[in-house]
Image: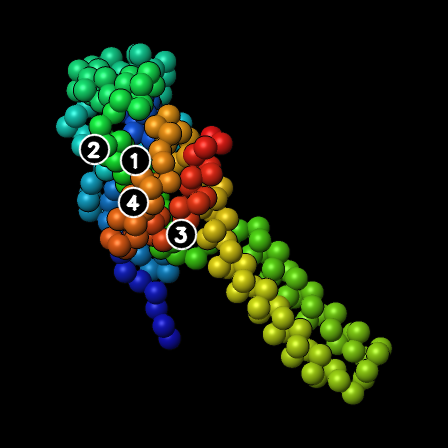
Amino acid sequence: MYIVWGRKITRRPLGYVADFCGICREPQPFKLARLDSVGHVYYISFGGGKPVGHERTCTKCGTFSAATVADYARVSRSAGPFETLKRETYPGLDEAVAARLELEQRVKTAPHLLSQGERLGLIRSAFLLMSPKVEKRFESTHLDFGVVLAFCAAIGLCIAAPVVAKAVAPDSMDQSVLVAMAIGAVLVIWQFFAAGSRYMRKEILPIIAKSLAPLKPSEAEIGQTMLEFHRAGHKIGIKLKVSEVVESTRTA
């Protein structure tokens, strides 16, 4: 008997803090969570967890990244109003990100005057911040509506095939079931692969496009950045196409 056991990462919500979001390009409320490594049997946790870090998730764009709890004066139970949250949890936020806020102001008023290094740094930042979300998504198999629909279609084919064959060609009932099973398997496999592309188009691409839009990046700049991520083995550089990012950024 095969037993599924090991350790997994769980997230324990701690509350809310104010911080700067590189995707939204401005300070935002964040959900703060503690990451624990816990033992599990068949994915059911047992025993006490071992703290392994903290994570913050922007309440606006959903981007998450590692958090340093020492940066915050305290953690709030509620997210707003924002100025109150900032005063309570990170009173020095404006000073801490003053240089970045100045850069963002230049992005808004004169993006064409940014240096090439500044432009590429901001473009890389958007991909770097979204990369953990993409990696987490592709760590395991996910069933979206398309995959579920393919499963239903495959089952329907297997049920309908012998009925139709019995009425039309009784001698080919066995063959019809095999053909239906083969078609159903192809449908399911096709939708499993397509699910990843759908996720990237719906959940990742719009956020990256919105973040990059103020920069008005060229196709060469996006291509150079994505090639770097592709060579480094980041799935965000593999699952997205340069043409998709360029088009989405122009229409964001």
In the rendered image, the quadrant that contains the N terminus is bottom left
Which element carries disc 4, helix, strand or loop?
helix
Seen at 24% across and 45% down, the residue is 36
- Residue 123 shows which numbered tag? 1
Q: Earlier in the sequence, mark 2 or mark 3?
A: 2
CA distance for labels 2 and 3: 25 Å
Look at the image and name its color scheme.
Answer: rainbow
Lower position in the chain sequence, tag 1 or tag 3: 1
In the image, residue 22 lies at what x, y percent? 29, 29
Q: Residue at x 81, y 84 (%)?
A: 170
CA distance separating discs 4 and 3: 15 Å
Q: Mark 1, mark 3: which one is toward the viewer?
A: 1
Amino acid at circle 3: Lys
Q: Is residue 137 above or below residue 54?
A: below
Q: Which residue is mark 3?
A: 239
**Regarding mark 2 in the picture, which secondary structure is present there?**
helix
